[in-house]
Amino acid sequence: MIKVDLSKLAGFIPDDYVAARQEKLAQAAEMLAKHNGPGGDYTGWVALPRDYDREEFARIQAAAEKIRKQSQVLVVIGIGGSYLGARAVVELLTSPNYNLLKKDTPDIYFAGNGLSTDALQELLEIIGDRDFSVNVISKSGTTTEPAVAFRIFKGLLEKKYGKEGARERIYATTDKARGALKGLADAEGYEEFVVPDDVGGRYSVLTAVGLLPIACAGIDIVKLMAGARQAMDELSAGGPENPAWQYAAARHAVYQSGKKVELLACYEPRFRFFAEWWKQLYGESEGKDGKGLFPASVEYNADLHSMGQYIQEGERMLLETVVSFAPKNEYIIPDDAANADGLNFLSGKPLSFVAEKAMRGVILAHVDGGVPNVLLQLPPISETSVGYLIYFFEYVCGLSGYLLEVNPFNQPGVEAYKKNMFALLGKPGYEDMKAALEARL
Ligand code: PA5
């Protein structure tokens, strides 16, 4: 389903970059398949499109149906891997303006991914007196930002509907056995969904973490899983023709050649949050031990007129990866008798033709400016192609982490800020640290 065009890497890295990494790629693929590499306990996502829990999947579909019937708004509470995937897929498959569309599915808002009072108050005003439900998502069940938001929304639901009514509107997605959220959900009798033990947050979009909000938006999650399954089947056959092997090898070779940043570019505005999901996936997986390409993103054509100058002529530290979906619809550019803009040479041509030429021109300009390019080409945006792309990026990320010789499935660096925050907030047990930090403020 995916076509990986690596022709614009020529001259930037040695021609044999895949062959030179063949042995390490084979080892990486085997470690992913056998779950025995670094972080192997968190590689449950590798076989997820085949082995997912069918009983829970049916409950997700039923819960989504219930939420659609009982609520005009769904508030999804989570941070990092516990919200980015859902938002990415909802926006890519519907619209970044999903909440403004005419639809028979609830508006969906994401909360608990920050601590802004303004953002919270704005959301409360937007919800107003509409009926709403909450899906609180936290694998650890102890993350501060979503826990604070849930405390607030739980209180609001109980005030509005009573304890019984609130119970019918709260859905908790968390660990099957551990954590404060699990304890709370058990005690209160909320409907629960599980973040599997062997799937980390940033790889969890195809579990209940992503699937429940996605299904609430009316997206066909059966097709989404089918796309991921197709990717799983196609990419598990290793070898130099495997597009995941090629892309992982290319990223590694470009990094070793001295590039520091991978810029993910797309010409679809609805891709923006998918890029946010991708940034977390690669940033948390590779950025450790002083290594890793820094994942960044741009939205073309708009960013050609803001970031384009730097990309063309700034520090030569970039790899550009472009995601291109085939167009789904056509819009024909009209003729204009006056031709005041001089654009009649485009009259009668589809807008997508202009977009394609613009993309090709940009790639060549950037390559000429010293930015190697990878082009990922996909069929039109659909549940199937998006499911495929999710799995493709996850699989390449696993391979890439092993090529880089890091554990792509932990995130020890995320703990540092949490400890400081707990200490400064006066959480019991952090007293010594509090004093030391306050002395430095
Ligand atoms: O990928 C990850 O593991 C993290 O980004 C987590 O998803 C994030 O920190 C939220 O954690 P939790 O789901 O435990 O609240």
Image: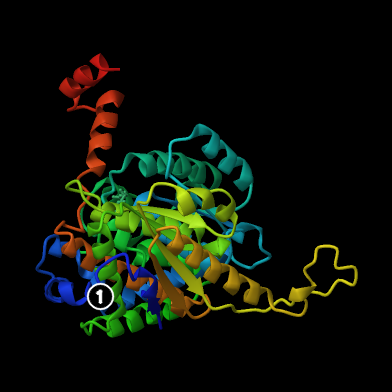
Residue 394 position in % (x across, y down): 30, 67
Q: Residue at x 63, y 68 (%)?
A: 104
Residue 194 position in % (x across, y down): 29, 62
Along the line of sight, the residue nearer the viewer: 189 or 56: 56
Question: From the viewer's perspective, is residue 235 above or below residue 154?
Answer: below
Secondary structure under the numbered disc 1 in the rendered image: helix
Report the quarter where the N terminus lies: bottom left
Residue 95 position in % (x across, y down): 58, 64
Residue 378 position in % (x across, y down): 46, 78
What is the crowding at mark 1: few (fewer than 14 residues within 10 Å), some, or many (at least 20)? many
Would residue 333 be visible to someone looking at this image?
A: no
Q: Residue at x 69, y 78 (%)?
A: 350
Report the quarter where the C terminus lies: top left
Residue farthest to the left, as pictured: 36
Left or right: 2, with 408 as reference point: right
Along the line of sight, the residue nearer the viewer: 71 or 34: 34
Q: Residue at x 80, y 66 (%)?
A: 342
Amino acid residing under circle 1: Trp
- Which image quarter: residue 280? bottom left
Q: Which residue is mark 1?
A: 245
